Image: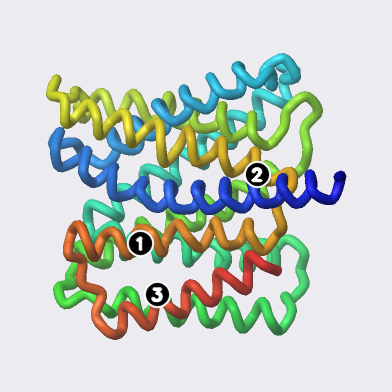
Amino acid sequence: MSTFVAASARGRSAIALIVAGVLWGTGGLSGNLLAAKAHLHPLPVAAYRLLLGGACTVLFVWATGRLRRVVWTKAVIRRLLVAGALLGQFQACYFLSVSLTSVSIATMITIGSVPVFATLFTTIRDRRLPGTTTLVATAAAIAGLALLTWAPVEGGWELLGGVAFALLAGAGFATLPLATGKPVDGLDSFCTTAFGLLVGGLALAPAALWIGMALPLRLDVLAVALYFGLVPTGIAYAAYFLALRTAHPVLVALATLLEPLTAVVLSVILFHDQLGVAGWCGAGLLVTALAVSYTR
């Protein structure tokens, strides 16, 4: 009986992780659609994702009783401020990259560069070279990033700027687990993410308000905004953290891989993004590198 319950729990975790990965992959697309429909700058788009997504996840934390476990010490507040700053930087740079390149290229470069930066940061911190497998995966990721950058027919300063912002986003996201990895009494990882999203949105709000973040009161715009904040952020993170308790590490890696794959496939179908042969080869190298990195 216990074996059946454990297998059933693993099955539910697998489904939840797949759902989380696919939903994450729609974040860039829905944000890009919101920017187009409401004529928004990338910073307000990032602020909306963090504010709406953060509000949804904090409500989920409250509804599941996790909020009672949070102990509001100075260490907890510092951790949430750090998480919020890094999440705000990550989302702002990501949507700036989307505005200058495309959803597919921005997502692949951002997510694909994360293990490269993580390897670099941990090598510097530990003062020890990584293993051979990690070095090969990192080299494959760098080659994939180079091919993706070379893939677009139209380049110029916009492409270079978009790639730079995507790399900054990847560096910020890679820094997040290093900066928040040490446990803090009275705060778990889900609460860190939930309140970090909200803090990041509040940090971006002054600049977003100054630029202009008013939404037209049209049903299609409000529906996209609601989806943007609720589904690829709130629901996706809730599914991910609930599944982590019983999930196999390989399935966790699969969820991470599904985000860029979903973004690329939907971008090609819906927005007619063209990666070209070099771009698809680069995407393949990045997916392989991500699979090796996250599985290990």
> Can residue 103 be seen?
yes
Residue at 21%, 44% in the rendered image:
33
Q: Nearer the viewer, mark 2 or mark 1?
A: 2
Label 3 or label 2, whichever comes before in sequence order: 2
Residue at 44%, 48% in the rendered image:
24
Q: Amino acid at mark 3?
A: Ala
Q: Give me the disc on residue 243.
A: 2
Q: Give me the disc on residue 164.
A: 1
Q: Amino acid at mark 1?
A: Ala
Q: CA distance from mark 2 to mark 1?
A: 33 Å
Q: CA distance from mark 3 to mark 2?
A: 27 Å
Q: Position of residue 191 (x, y in %)?
A: 64, 29
Q: Residue pushed farthest right?
A: 2
Give above or below for 225 relative to 20.
Answer: above
- In the picture, measured across the screen, residue 190 lies left or right of residue 148, that is right
Crowding near pointer 1: few (<14 within 10 Å), some, many (20+)? Answer: some
Q: Amino acid at mark 2?
A: Ala
Which residue position is annotated with label 3? 283
Residue at 71%, 47% in the rendered image:
8
